[in-house]
Image (cartoon, rainbow, N blue to C red):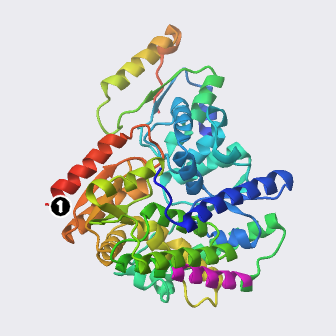
Amino acid sequence: MAEKQLESTVAATSFQKQWFGDLRRRVFDERRPYALVQADVPFELFDLLEIPAVSNQWWASLVAAKRLAPAFLDAMTADGLADQLCRYCSLGLATTRYAKAGEAPWGGLPAPRLLCARLTCDCIHRVFSLWAEAFDAELFEIDNPGASELPPRWWELTRHRWRELVEPHRLELVAATLERLVERLESIGARRLDRAALRERLERVNRQEETFDAARRLIAAAPATPVRMTEQIANVMATQWVRGTDWAVAHAQHFYDELRERVDSGIAACPGEKLRLMWVGAGLWHDTDFYAAFEDSHGAVFVWSMYLAFGPDCYIRYGLDDPLAALASRTASFNEFLHNPPWAAEWIVAQAREHRIDAALVLHPKSMKPSATGRRFIERALEEAGIPVLPVEADVVDARAWDPAAARRAVRRFLDERVLQ
Amino acid sequence: MRRYDDALGTVAAVVISLPSDDESFGWDYPRVRERLARHAIPHAVLRGEPALDVTATDRERIRTLLGAMPASARRETRCG
């Protein structure tokens, strides 16, 4: 694994391990409730009602990064679940349903009191129902109303004009759903949600994301990127799961300060940077070394992924008189921004230009439907903007069909033949 | 699942059309299989695309299923 260049990355990794250890202790020793949730649900509500939330995607990425996934995935296949079904959303379920097949990281997931997911794809209801059944826990689902208006440059509307962007009928539906979620969490947590505290929390989320926005601009404008993409992800995601907490706000600042210092001192993640690459899609969690594999041969460094950029553009909300509505406006539109044409393509091209991207690698996940469907549009938009694209067929948690050497050869050939020509 | 249970008393075997990328019913298969096993009802899973012709592999699966059924059960075929 490539060495960690930033102190803040070491701190972020250590925080997550400690956080999960504390969670297990609370659940097992103190019999306190926790929730198992999809990454796009409003974590702030859970945290304020003292029901810590573990993200399904974070857990899946951890299992994959520790190379523990194949045993669980083989068990799924042996049970008759076809390999084409989404593995990113279901690897966590596999660690529960087929617990004896392998060893889950850090002692495994304890039984949650509640599971919560947005219904963004055909598989989510099924996967989470099975998981809730396996844990004998309650499932709370959040509907995903589709956008009927797709105004251009959505990221310029999210901060101040979010009511208009999300459309009143969608906002109303999601806000009403969140009210019901609050009722459930209040009942489980045996406490009332303090709306003033929610507003304060969202203000602190804004502060955290403003800091990440400054970090993003620093990376975009620096002569050479001061931080590898993988370390951006480690720092950003450790804070996103506990966003708006004291630790998260302070850690975002620590991350920014370290980047500022590196830029001021002329320290590059890849000395001799020649090519700036963009990764479109979820992280290749089982092979994160892939992202540093072209630095020595081509001076090619991954500068951008959605993880750092999405927070500032999607999470910040100004005008928090009705904090639950602001939170609902974020919850309502995650997927269109990240995956669907024309929004995703337009945003990614704008990000590529801002970050002076020379070439893009676009993940083609075989089984993740919502994130796979818009890929062709993104590729076409990037190519039309003059940015060469290499599609990468891979599953982000399932390494069984991944050939690391062949994938690296394909990228080197692409850089030689399409980017350096 | 109740629909399956209601029907299980009236059938000798089950053919399940389940394309590999069916993100909805694909997840139900282990539970369906367990129910069928509980009732000792043989089954075959066809993985081909239902809008297209039956694949050779799927035809073979049906043949195998028919071969596993007692002759008395093969006299009547229920479709649905």
Residue A170 seen in the current view: no
Q: Which residue carries the number 1 mark? A: A420
Q: Is residue A262 visible?
A: yes
A235, A28: nearer the viewer:
A235
Image check: A176 left or right of A190? left
Chain of residue at mark 1: A
Q: Is residue A134 left or right of residue A330?
A: right
Q: Is residue A278 magenta?
A: no
In the displayed orientation, state which residue is furthest to the top: B71
**SS at badge 1:** loop
Q: Amino acid at mark 1?
A: Leu
The quarter of the displayed image where residue A97 is located:
top right
Position of residue A382 in the picture relative to residue A114 (left or right): left
Whole-percent x, y for residue A420 in the image: 17, 61
The x and y percentages for residue A381 are 25, 68
Q: Position of residue A200 (x, y in %)?
A: 68, 85
Residue in view at x 23 percent, y 64 percent: A380
Q: Which residues are magenta?
A: A197-211
Of helix, strand and loop, which mostly describes the magenta segment? Answer: helix
**Dot 1, crowdedness within 10 Å: few (<14), some or many (≥20)?**
few
Q: Residue at x 49, y 46 (%)?
A: A87
> Residue placed at 30% from the left, 41% from the top?
A406
Q: Nearer the viewer, residue A189 or A382?
A: A382
Q: Is residue A222 above or below residue A413?
A: below
Q: Residue furthest front?
A: A265
Q: Residue furthest left?
A: A421
Locate the C terminus of chain A by quadrant.
Answer: bottom left
Residue A105 position in % (x across, y down): 64, 45
| Residue A145 position (above or below residue A196) | above
